[in-house]
Image (tube, grey):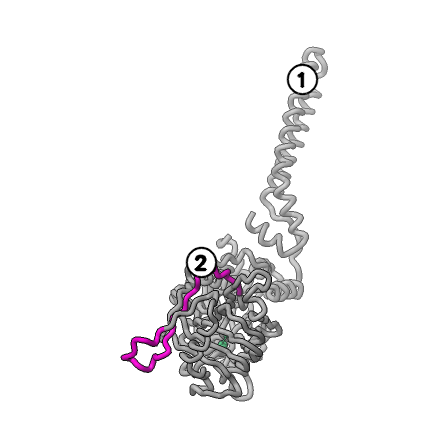
Amino acid sequence: MTAFELVGESGWNNVVSVIKSSKKSEDDEELEEVEEEEEEEEEEEEEKGEEKGEEMEEDVDDEKSWEKVDNEKEEMESEITIQPPQVPPVDQSTSMRNLRESLSKINSAFSVSGEIYVDKNEPLVVFFDTDKDNKQSKGGAHRMEFPLTDSTIINKLVEACSPASFGFKTETVLNLEYRQALKIDSSNFLTSFDVYRNGIVDVISKTLVSNAPVCAELHKLNVYGPGGFFKPHVDTPLTTDMFGSLVVCLPAKFEGGVLRVTKDELTKRFDWGRTCIDENNGDQYVQWVAFFSDCPHDITPVTSGHRITLTYNLYKRSPNEVLSPQIDVQDFSFYRELKASLMNPNFFNSGAIFGFHCQHSYQSVEFDMLKGNDMVVFQAAVHCGLNVYLKSIVDGYGDSFIGNVSEEGNGGQYESKDKFIEESFDVVRVRDDRITWFGSRAGKKSHAYLHYGNEASISHVYSSVVLVVEVPSFKQRIKALTVAE
Ligand SMILES: O=C(O)CCC(=O)C(=O)O
Ligand SMILES: [Fe+2]
């Protein structure tokens, strides 16, 4: 039945057969009922015949012929029950088209956002220190409450800030042409805003990293006053397990200062100045967005007021867990399509090497760090019992190369016989025609901003990554696929 369902969704004809086969069980019952009635009628007639003393031999023959028909019927039924419908497998190009189409439909989010009502009876508190450089000082702490009752406290906040720098290559630089903002380091302020208790971290975990455990680390408090802005940059990965950034905007009146987050051709705008305070009833909201930190983003100039934000770095917690357990590949047509293709003898009958360009950029080439769509592709391949290799693309010699990094798969269900994988994966041309490529190299935009991070980049930089998938011959893979059912 599983096979029916899996194949079924990939080809229209088979969908009908799934419906048919599930309907069949109801029909069976009806058929049995009809047969029982018929038997009763026959018995009655037999009795009548006996009573009438009519030619019994003929009846016996009839009975035999009925038996035969019944047997044939049974045989037919059991054939229908056991045998999958005989739909001729599609040709390879149709299979490939379906696979590419389903790949383009994987649509995992690159950002997730929300808002939280700020209850006047439970104000959000920020404590900050205006005398942080004087360790002996006892009088530097200030309490700031949201909703703001006295906006003069913002002047005190500005006083506690220092100019915000950013990372240019490996140096921390202050360049007012690139970023004009103020900051307080996390060691010099405290807030009652709890991203765990109010559910933000759970939402991020669910939406961005397939339920992997997430740790949000408070990074900075930033103030963008009138004229403040931050030009396009990516957020510098501080460790190998950092995957994203969370920005929380506190409700203070401001205009402009729109945060724009870009992924490929898509840009999301967060014009929080317009929405942080409801002008009709004065209700105030904390607004937030989390995004993969390799997504380029910028802040347009603030035209009035002060834009106050808290920033957090997001980490995946258990980096040693290779598979995020909660991702359900069955939900993705890409998985179903891949499986259907692998079960198709016309689909690369003697095997192939697939190269899936990852949609995101990575500072570490580890499977558990895969984000969004890339995790879906990886999980789908592994669930189909395929060996998967994760390679970063290294630019050089006027062409792009794949460097040997990481290897994962189903633990040797297939012998990796292909010399190409065994021997030549240290350095491979991305345009190698022995590989069947899917998608196009992503992250070029992120790399264009590679030198503009929010921190000075020390040892981690983003690079493009490829999931190399080994597709065994039909004969080899069909065994494993059938066992995996
Ligand atoms: O304040 C914001 O909206 C984002 C700031 C930012 O991009 C950063 O600090 O890296
Ligand atoms: Fe940033």
Secondary structure beneath disc 1? helix
In front of the other: 131 or 181: 131
Where is residue 34 drawn, in percent x and y?
A: 66, 28
Label 1: few (<14), some (14–19) or many (≥20) C-alpha neighbours in 10 Å: few
Whether residue 382 is visible, yes or no, is no
Residue 444 belongs to magenta span: no
Residue 357 relative to residue 48: left or right: left
Q: Are marks 2 and 1 in contact (CB under 8 Å)?
A: no
Secondary structure beneath disc 2? loop
| Residue at image location 43% in from the left, 87% down from the top | 171
Where is residue 314 drawn, in percent x and y?
A: 44, 69
In front of the other: 303 or 290: 303
Label ID, residue 451: none
Q: Residue tagged by mark 2?
A: 121
Looking at the image, residue 32 lies above or below residue 269: above
The amino acid beneath tag 1 is: Glu
Where is residue 175 drawn, in percent x and y?
A: 49, 88
Asked whether mark 1 and ligand 1 are closer than 8 Å, the reply comes as: no
Residue 121 belongs to magenta span: yes
| Residue at image location 67% in from the left, 54% down from the top | 12
| Residue at image location 68% in from the left, 21% down from the top | 41
Q: Residue tagged by mark 1?
A: 44
Residue 334 relative to residue 38: left or right: left
Q: Quadrant of residue 198?
A: bottom left
In front of the other: 356 or 68: 356
Looking at the image, tell me whether mark 2 or mark 1 is earlier in sequence order.
Answer: 1
The amino acid beneath tag 2 is: Asn
Whether residue 396 is visible, yes or no, is yes
Which residues are drawn in magenta?
113-141
Where is residue 271 drawn, in percent x and y?
A: 58, 71
Looking at the image, residue 325 lies above or below residue 276: above
